[in-house]
Structure formats: C-alpha cells, structure tokens
Amino acid sequence: MGVLNSWLANRYLPFWEAYLRALEVEIVRAEEEAINLPFPPPIRRLLSQIFSLKSQGVDFLLLPDTQLGQEAQKGSSSPWLVGLDATLEQLVPGLPPVLVVPAELSPEVAGLAAEIGQNLTQNPMLARRALERTKHLLNASYSPPKQSGTHPIGLIAQPMLLCDTHWLTALKAGLAAHGLSLFLADKAPAKLRQEGAHLELGLELPTDLEAAGMHRYLSRLGKVEGLLYVHDAEYLPLPTPLRKLLKKAPPPKPWRIVGLDAAWGQVAFELAKDLKV
C-alpha cells in the first residue's frame, strides 16, 4: 500500500498506517523525485510522490478525501481540492488502484476501515482483530503546533498547504530575515470550520470553511500582528467569497495576499515596514 507524506497525511495516517500494518499489509512511503511539470511546487511534490509510488510497484494507493464527502453545489472549485483521485487518474498513466479515505479521523470511520480490511485480506477475522487493536486511534485528539518568535504573522491558506514543509521553510526564513515569525492557527480543524461558518459566506467545502476560519480567528487574535493570505488562484485557491470579504472589510491589522511563487523576503519586508519593525 502506497501512502503520501503530504496533503493532510498527518491527519489520517496515524490510524490507517497502524491499521494496515495490523492487517499485515506492507506500507510503502513515497520518495520525492524532481519532476518538471507546469504546476506550483506543492502540487509538483505531490505528483513526485505519486510517480515514486507507481515506480515502486505498489498494488494500491491510499488517498485522502479532503472534503470529507462534502460536494460543492455551486461555483467551480479546483479539481485538486474536490477530486484528487480523479485528477491523478487523468494525469498519471497507469495509476495504481486507489483507496480513498476521509482526511480526518473519527469513530465513524471504523465501518469503512472494516470494509477495506476485509477486501484487502479476504479474512474477516484478521480484519476484525486488526480493527480492535487500532480503533482507539480514531479518537485522536488535536495537538496545537509549538510556536515561538517575535512579531507573529498569521498564515491563511488551504490546509493542505500548511502540511507542505518545503515552502513553509522558505516562508519562515523570509520572515525571520526581517524580524518576523510565522504563526499557524492553533485550533483543531473542526473548530476552524465552525469559525468559518460564523462568517456566513455561503461556503460548503470543509477546506474552504477551514481557511475562512483561519481568517476569522487570526484576525482577532491579539498576539498575531499581521496576516498573510497565500493561494494559487488556479490550483489551490482561497474561496472567492473570502477574497471579496478582504476587499470589502479588510482585516484590522497589516496584511498581504500573495501567490505561492511570491518572493518571501520582499513580502516579509513589506509587512515589517507596515509593522514598523
């Protein structure tokens, strides 16, 4: 079974990796390889992992449903946000069969896990024992990130971007060079979605609600001195209603909205200038 190292993997793999091992299924982790494709870096890295797993000859790919079964009834969303499996099937010839699981853990996932376990092993007893040993992981609690530094800048983006350590490292370095530090919303995803719903923007997708929740929470959090909104308009956009809200009612602190290809040093310089750091 091939598994990803990004794209919200930290939210669902703690259970699925343990469960698959209990099923005696071999876990194959992706290795990133340089690929030259016209996509922003986080998507290139995702595709690199997919090609790596394909080349390793895995029988199945475990992919996340980042929208937790919710479909957008209006508007056009990026296929990378709403249909990762279908998008990859179009881009990657000979993609191994995929198993799609919710990108978050809850006791309700146990039924799906039992079904997948029986299909993989053709052994209901083994699947039942494996689930009994690992189902406590479905109750995984949220642990906020450990953060420190001066002049915190809150980050608002699609949540899968916040799992990509590569570009976050570059962003942190750019901020640090100007005396600033990165601050990620330290609330559980479900709580951030509740925050986003309070804005009443008509958002439907969980990741859009989560990004909007980051905006609402970080805008009012006193210790956060500035805000940075990061998205890729084509592939990983912030929801349009949120961007319209920024124009109509800007946050009460210095802020910028930039693309994933931004020069982080320049962005940090401008925020530091606004903050008089």
Image (tube, rainbow, N blue to C red):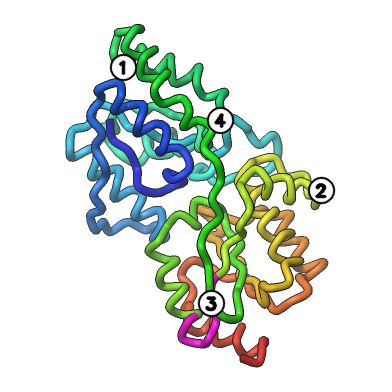
Marking on residue 255: none
The answer to which of 132 and 193 lies nearer the viewer is 132
Q: CA distance from mark 3 to mark 4?
A: 33 Å
Taking the spot 60% from the left edge, 73% from the top edge, the residue there is 153
* Stretch in magenta: 176-182
Quadrant in which the C terminus is drawn: bottom right
Amino acid type at mark 1: Leu
Report helix, strand or loop for mark 3.
loop
Give the residue number, with chain letter if any, for mark 1.
120
Give the residue number, with chain letter if any, for mark 3.
149
Label 4 Cα neighbours within 10 Å, binned few <14 / some 14-19 / many ≥20? some
Give the x, y percent position of residue 11.
48, 42
Sequence order check, earlier mark of 2 and 3:
3
Q: CA distance from mark 2 to mark 1?
A: 42 Å
The reply to whether callout 1 and callout 3 are in contact (CB within 8 Å) is: no
Marking on residue 200: 2
Amino acid type at mark 4: Ser
Amino acid type at mark 2: Glu
Give yes or no for residue 179 being in the magenta stretch: yes
Q: Is residue 195 left or right of residue 78?
A: right
Q: CA distance from mark 4 to mark 1?
A: 21 Å
Label 2 Cα neighbours within 10 Å, binned few <14 / some 14-19 / many ≥20? few
Sequence order check, earlier mark of 1 and 3:
1
The reply to whether callout 2 and callout 4 are in contact (CB within 8 Å) is: no
